[in-house]
Amino acid sequence: MQISSRFTIAIHIFACIDTFEKDNKITSDFLADSVNANPVVIRKILSSLKKSHLLNVQRGTGGTTIAKPLDQITLYDIYQSVECIENGKLFHFHENPNTNCPVGKNIHNILDDKLLRVQKAMEDELSAITLKDVIDDTRYYIKECIK
Amino acid sequence: MQISSRFTIAIHIFACIDTFEKDNKITSDFLADSVNANPVVIRKILSSLKKSHLLNVQRGTGGTTIAKPLDQITLYDIYQSVECIENGKLFHFHENPNTNCPVGKNIHNILDDKLLRVQKAMEDELSAITLKDVIDDTRYYIKECIK
DNA sequence: TGTAGATGTAACTATTATAGTTACATTAAA
DNA sequence: TTTAATGTAACTATAATAGTTACATCTACA
């Protein structure tokens, strides 16, 4: 199963804020239009990102801004914020393996460390990419586009 | 969303074959008992692994064996075989971002290479672990268990 | 102070993938 | 020819994603 689009939508949101905040108030409706998704879906994602102190979302009057310098937000921070995987484990285990079988009894002993290593490799790579990288590219591609 | 338990079940199957093939014919019912899953679920996984030439599954009379030396099967081979992610992409993208918006129009240009890098980091780590590693540990833990 | 326009969130629906299950045709060997 | 297995279609149950409606709440400003 793939990792939820909440993650790519969240990144899209940051790129939109950076691109449009000078000229537009960034509302959930505005973002929903760019992402092409439902405003309530956007608001749920904004709510997660706000809870993680990555965004400031203004109640009442509306408007969203990025809460930290771009090079201090990693893709891992965003990924964690929108909770793309349950209980933090990338790999889903079959429930209740037969403990009367020596393999069933030990399957977690055998696999947990190896799968965690794999998960960590992925998460480390997510941590190595910051919003600065994303937004530098965003600005570049938009400039190329206008030319 | 987590990666399907088909993957961990498949690994479990290899460990079972290695552990029990001397004394037992390895059938889908036998495996289902150790994994604690439905025999048809097991057969579907066996079918994938057979198609990828990782296992030999005997029709009619039954019985399953491992098709290659243990150090020549990686966790990545197994992962690919049981097709845990759709169309080979780990990250699910929101469909049809608004191409009238410069961010929506470029979101794939901006993100595809970065997310592929993350996916590759995970897959490389899966490739670095072979069934030999898994089964060495299986034998070790089972021996410890019996002591 | 009331209202306009936004967020926050509950409740529901639709869709999709996983996993389990029943049933049965097919196969291979004894 | 019988037995015991695989292969697979068809269906169900469950759970997560994503969309939608509805409305309470909040804040600034006219």
Image (cartoon, coloured by chain):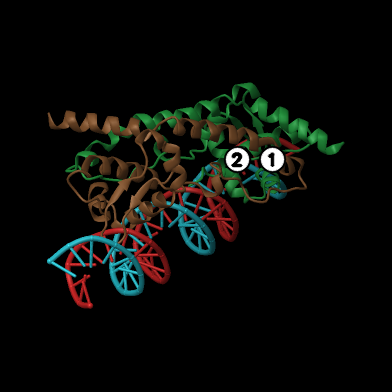
Chain colours: A brown, B green, C red, D cyan
Within 10 Å of disc 2 (Cα), the crowding (few <14, some 14-19, many 20+) is: many
- For the point 72% across and 27% down, the residue is B136
Say which quarter of the image contains residue A126.
Answer: top left
- On the image, the x and y values in percent for residue B140 come to 77, 31
What number of labels is visible? 2
Inspect this view and state whether residue A63 appears. Answer: yes
Mark 2–mark 1 CB contact (< 8 Å):
yes
- On the image, the x and y values in percent for residue A36 come to 25, 50
Residue type of the residue flagged with mark 1: Ile
- For the point 46% across and 30% down, the residue is A125
Q: Is residue B146 above or below residue C25?
A: above
Say which quarter of the image contains residue B5.
Answer: top right
SS type, badge 2: helix
Circle number at residue A107? 1
SS type, badge 1: helix
Toward the viewer: A5 or B24? A5
